[in-house]
Structure formats: structure tokens, C-alpha cells
Image (cartoon, rainbow, N blue to C red):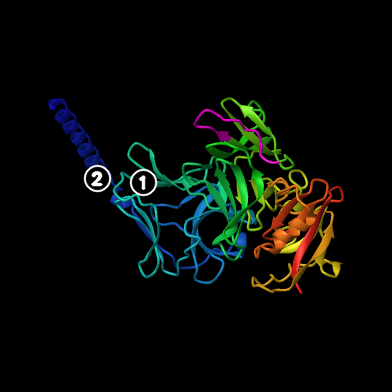
Amino acid sequence: MASQLSSLFFQFIFISVFAFATTLAKVPANETFEFINQGEFGDRIIEYDASYRVIRNDVYTFYTYPFRLCFYNTTPDAYIFAMRAGIPNDESLMRWVWDANRNDPVHENATLKFGEDGNFVLADADGRVVWQTNTANKGVTGIRLLPNGNLVLFGKNGKFIWQSFDYPTDTLLVGQSVKINGRNKLVSRKSDLDGSDGPYSLILNHNGFIMYLNNLGQQLIFGGWPTKDFADIVTFAAEPVDVNETNTPYELVLSLTHLQAQQSTSPAGNGRRLLQVRPIGGGSTINLNKVNYNGTYSFLRLGSDGNLRAFTYFPPASYLKWEESFAFFSSYFIRECALPSKCGTYGLCDKRMCVACPSPNGLLGWSESCKPPKPVPCRAGAKFDYYKIVGVEHFLNPYLDDGEGPMKVEQCRDKCSKDCKCKGFIYKEDTSRCLTAPVLGTLIKDVNTTSVGYIKYSK
């Protein structure tokens, strides 16, 4: 009993001392600030054709080559607190690589405040707190924008108490990660003008590192690395090919970390979209692409069209210094026609080109106005039929093993007809497999397949 009381006493003393020390640790008064979102805009070209204001004051510039903190908007009086990458004097498009509040923009005269308690707070003009780091009285003593683009709040010993690298939006900078036990995904923006969460995501889970399309709440796989126990942490990295050479090329990679004993990494599905994975020590990397210059300033982004791309900063270029250095759907990686949005909301794609707009009257010329058939009313007695497209696949085919089966085509048709959400089906004649499609998007022309598409339309 005495030993238990003694143990409890020492635990109490330890907790009290820790709490006292944390309370004493605070931001020096001369390093606190409050920035008001007002004044003139910058005059350089910037991504999304945005208007922007640089964030700086007498204490901080919040600039570390080539990163800077800003407010920007793509529609009037709707501002995002964000980080840009690029140099204004380059006369090249600067890029946005991190957003704090893209789903809740603020207005003119919003405030960004860093107080003695160590909390970093974005409040709208009416005082409503829109975003914060939740670090009040947690031992924060300073704030800094690091050379790698990581915005950090740190304590007396330099330990990071909060960092922007833990909260990616649609982009990973070199050295930044997604984690199963943490922020485990990238989410696209809706469009260039609308920075709120879009329909595409890249999610790390126990089934792999997978690209999904959110179709009315249903997550549809369309890319990525669907492999069981893929990794616990995935880090975007740029590695020199030869560490002994000054001007060596760099390899852009995804570095995989397993926190427990690595399980089998045998791929799921039929392997038509699986990529090179090579063991490195206790982990592994996935090679994305090689650039013939220093790749330190690179970022990996899930775009509003659903494609995963990397861009690398190349200072010697006179224009377009952010060079596209990788694209998941591209001529050198995964066929472009497999990108659901390649032909907009609907179209037939062949060899990287949108070649036709399927209709009940046959294949018409494709244009951006090509749309899928109007949904069949979900009620008894609704009249509908199907039109046929020979030699096509759906973007879901490789990931769902061509659907269910074997079954007859009449059974497949009946399955789709009874499902209000089914927009059509793909029937594989050689294997008698049936894939029902809840969304159409881009259909893939393949003369070597026995797949036939049947598209549902109202009569």
C-alpha cells in the first residue's frame, strides 16, 4: 500500500512539474503578431489566376526560398491562407502547395494571429475562428517556415509541436508523408476556381495507396497501387542517382515505411496497372520518374481532373520553371484513356485521344459538350433501353477483375436494369464476366478485348 502511495505521489509530482514547465514556455511578446488581410494585391502571375497578398510584418517575412505564405482568392472576397512555391522575378507561374482553410474561405479584414500562448489562429472579420493549430499552452515558443516548405511551431528544445507537413491537402512536398495513423490522404480541389474538396482522393489504407472517385458517396477505385499491407507511411522523395556526382539526375520516388513486420505485397487484381516496387533495406520505394537535374524542389499533386502529377522546379529555364516531371496517367506510365475525366463526363478514348461521343444513333464526333444519357427515372414502369458499343472497357475493369461471373449477358443486363444507380454494363464475352457501372465517364477503346459496353438510356 505504501509503495502504491509513493508511486502515485511521484506521478503527481512529475505531471505537476511538466504542466508547470509547459505553462512557463510561451512565445516572447516581441515575436507575436497579428496580420490583417487587407491592402494591395501582388502583381505576379500565379496559379489558378488568383489574386494574392503576401503575409509579412516587422517580425516575420514568412519566406524561405522558394516558399512564402499568402492569402489568395479565385473569387472575390473568399480568401485562403496558403503557401506558394516559386519566385516572382522568374516571370513563371507560381504554385500553391498547401492550404489551411480551403473549405471555409475568409473575407477582407480576416486576421491571422500568433499569440503568447502559442496558438496560431485564423479568424474571419467577424471574429469567428475558421482555422487554428490548437497549440495554446502546449509549450510553443516560436514559428518558422523551413527551407523544405514545412511551416512549424516549435518548443524550447526545437521539437516540432505542430507542422503543416502533417496536414497535406492535395499536394505532397519532398519529404512530406501520408500516414495510416494520421492524415492518410490527398483530396483534389473541385476546379481551378473552386478550391474546396473535389471528388478525387488518393488514400493510404490497408488495401494499398489507392486513387478513388467519389460518386455520390460511393468510392470507386480508378488508379494507384492496390496492394494489401502496402505501407504504414508513404513519403514523397527526390533521391540523387549518384551521390558522388554534383550534377547527377534525381529519381522521384514514393518511399514506403512499414512500422511492423512487412506482410506479403502481392498485388490485387489482374496486374494490368501495377507498377515497379523494389526493396530498399527494410522498406521499399516506387520509382515515379527521373529528372536530369536537382529534384529537391518538387511536389506531387492530385489534380482536379483526378490525375496524379509531379512538378519540379528548374531555375535555369527562362519560362515555365515548374516542369511536369511525372503523371500517373500518361504515355510513359498508365494509359491516359484510363483517367475517368479524360473525355470529361462522357466519351470514347483511343490512344490518348477522345475520338467519339457514343449515342443511341451510333458514335458521333466528340466535343466537350458530349454528355452521358439522362438518368433513367427510378420508378416502376420507367421505359429504357440499351445501346451497344463493341470493344470498350470501363476504368473500373482492371480493379474489379472485370466484375462478377460467369453469367449470361441477359443476366448481366437484368442486374443493371434492376439497379437504379446502374448507368450501363460491360460484358466480357470470352470470360462471361459482368461489370455494372454506377458512373460512365471515359470509356476505353480496345480492339483486342472481347468487352462490349451496353449503355442505359431513357426511351
Q: Secondary structure at mark 1?
A: strand
Closest to the observer, 302 or 173: 302
- The answer to whether one can see residue 364 in this image is no
Q: Is residue 176 left or right of residue 2?
A: right
Q: Are marks 1 and 2 in contact (CB under 8 Å)?
A: no
Name which residue type carries label 2: Thr
Q: Residue at x 52, y 66 (%)?
A: 41
Look at the image and tell me in which quarter the N terminus lies. Answer: top left
| Extreme residue in the left direction | 2
Among the 4 quarters of the image, the one containing residue 114? bottom left
Q: Residue at x 54, y 62 (%)?
A: 196
Closest to the observer, 259 or 379: 379
Query: Residue 155, percent across and down?
Result: 34, 41
Question: Relative to 21, is 90 above or below?
Answer: below
Dot 1 or dot 2: first in sequence order is 2
Q: Is residue 262 magenta?
A: yes
The residue labelled by disc 1 is 142
Question: Relative to 257, is 58 above or below?
Answer: below
Magenta-drawn stretch, dominant element (helix, strand or loop): loop
Which residues lie in the magenta part?
256-269
The residue labelled by disc 2 is 23
